[in-house]
Image (cartoon, rainbow, N blue to C red):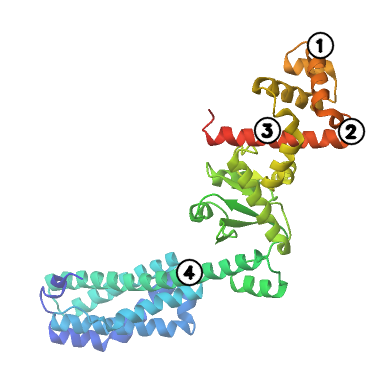
């Protein structure tokens, strides 16, 4: 507060005494003005809570008069009272806008009351103006105290609510078990409704904070040693897919399958596997979140990279001694032959070669691979081996920046 607001011209002692004598009426007029101008606080001031607010108004006026009388700034004893009033208003569920509006109405009423009393006491115009300025300066300080208390409690509660929601997320993703009763209680404390379905989004970024601000308030966040993730309620609801992809932007992420709450760890496990395959280039990440359920074959085949590599090497080992150019041509022909169910004209069209060339290459493959081409199990294993090889080629290509 500007000290000059309290050191202009002192109000005569008899004027201060007159104001003190009429203070109950001044407070009554302020309360009446707020009740008329604010539907929300009209009800509050009419109830038990109104007594505490009225007490705060009275104490603020006493501090104000004492400061004017001594040419000093009002003492800070009432500051914490008004901060606590702000805290109480947040806890009551009333909005900050309504609180500020009621405060403005009260300040105007206080100024009008002071002006009327100044005229009645014969205070000079310069002193009345200085008093009005002091009223507004003091009211601004009190309003700042109220808002500080309101925001302090709001911040404390938001932090506690976030901690409770992280606890819910941890319970959902606990791989050691799922206790519905414990989860329900934790969700109640966190003001979170356990949805009928959910999916877990695995993130490549370390922190999900920016993303959660762009998503619904019901999204839960969590992190562990493997990275960050989000629990997405009702992921298949109308517009949810588009909203999630828009929120992600260029951020890489993968969405696990839609599950019930007890199966959330599986959704996270699948999401992380899909994310790892997208990162390696084994599956096309496309735009938005990679949907794990759209890549089940790749996840099944490539989920264990060591095992997949062993299968590939075993199935295609007979081709290793060939010169690189011949080996690539034969592998390309083999892939087309399996894809087109051994239909030579289609294979030739795909490879842009003569059908006789296809027949020659297939004869060569029969010579090298033997019975593997003649049995369903052999053809299945060769197809898997080629799929592994293609995914690893894609990963190598991605790792080198596409060249």
The residue pinned by badge 2 equals 375
Label 2 crowd (10 A; few <14 / some 14-19 / many >=20): few
Question: Which tag, 3 or 1, sits closer to the chain's start?
Answer: 1
Res. 292 in view: no
Say above or below: 221 vs 16.
above
- Percent of width and height locating residue 346: 81, 18
**Left-right relation of 354 to 149:** right
Q: Which residue is drawn at 62% across and 33% down?
A: 394
| Figure quadrant of residue 376 | top right
Find residue 292 and report its horizontal and vertical position in percent: 69, 46
Foreground disc of the pair 3, 1 = 1
Mark 1 or mark 4: name the one nearer the start of the chain. 4
Callout 4 secondary element: helix
Left or right for 79, reference 272: left
Left or right of 315 on screen, residue 4 = left
- Disc sitting over residue 390 in the figure: 3
> What is the CA distance from the residue labelled 2 to the residue labelled 4?
63 Å
Whether label 2 touches label 4, CB < 8 Å: no
For mark 1, what is the residue?
356
Q: What element carries label 2?
A: loop
The residue under label 4 is 159
- The answer for how far apart the CA atoms under marks 2 and 3 are is 23 Å
């Amino acid at each position: 507060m500007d000290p000059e607001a309290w050191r202009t011209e002192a109000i005569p002692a008899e004027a201060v005494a007159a104001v003190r004598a009429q203070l109950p009426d001044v407070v009554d007029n302020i309360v009446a003005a707020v009740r008329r101008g604010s539907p929300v606080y009209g009800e509050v001031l009419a109830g038990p809570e109104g007594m505490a607010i009225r007490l705060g108004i009275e104490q603020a006026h006493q501090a104000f008069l004492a400061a004017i009388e001594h040419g000093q700034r009002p003492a800070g004893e009432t500051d914490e009272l008004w901060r606590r009033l702000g805290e109480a208003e947040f806890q009551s569920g009333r909005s900050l806008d309504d609180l500020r509006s009621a405060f403005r109405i009260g300040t105007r009423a206080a100024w009008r009351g002071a002006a009327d009393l100044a005229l009645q006491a014969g205070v000079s115009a310069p002193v009345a103006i200085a008093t009005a300025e002091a009223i507004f300066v003091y009211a601004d300080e009190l309003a700042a105290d109220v808002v500080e208390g309101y925001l302090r409690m709001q911040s404390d509660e938001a932090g506690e609510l976030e901690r409770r929601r992280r606890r819910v997320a941890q319970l959902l993703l606990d791989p050691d078990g799922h206790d519905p009763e414990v989860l329900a209680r934790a969700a109640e404390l966190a003001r979170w409704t356990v949805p009928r379905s959910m999916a877990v989004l695995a993130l490549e970024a370390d922190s999900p904070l920016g993303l959660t601000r762009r998503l619904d308030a019901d999204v839960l966040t969590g992190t562990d040693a493997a990275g960050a993730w989000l629990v997405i309620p009702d992921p298949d609801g109308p517009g949810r897919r588009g909203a999630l992809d828009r929120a992600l932007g260029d951020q890489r992420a993968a969405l696990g399958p839609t599950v019930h709450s007890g199966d959330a760890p599986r959704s996270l496990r699948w999401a992380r596997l899909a994310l790892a395959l997208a990162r390696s280039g084994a599956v096309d990440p496309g735009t938005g979140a990679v949907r794990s359920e759209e890549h089940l074959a790749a996840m099944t085949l490539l989920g264990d990279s060591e095992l997949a590599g062993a299968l590939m090497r075993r199935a295609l080992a007979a081709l290793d001694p060939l010169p690189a150019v011949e080996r690539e041509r034969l592998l390309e022909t083999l892939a087309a032959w399996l894809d087109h169910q051994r239909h030579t004209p289609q294979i030739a069209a795909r490879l842009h070669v003569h059908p006789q060339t296809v027949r020659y290459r297939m004869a060569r493959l029969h010579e090298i691979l033997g019975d593997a081409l003649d049995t369903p199990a052999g053809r299945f294993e060769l197809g898997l081996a080629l799929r592994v090889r293609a995914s690893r080629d894609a990963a190598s290509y991605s790792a080198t920046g596409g060249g």
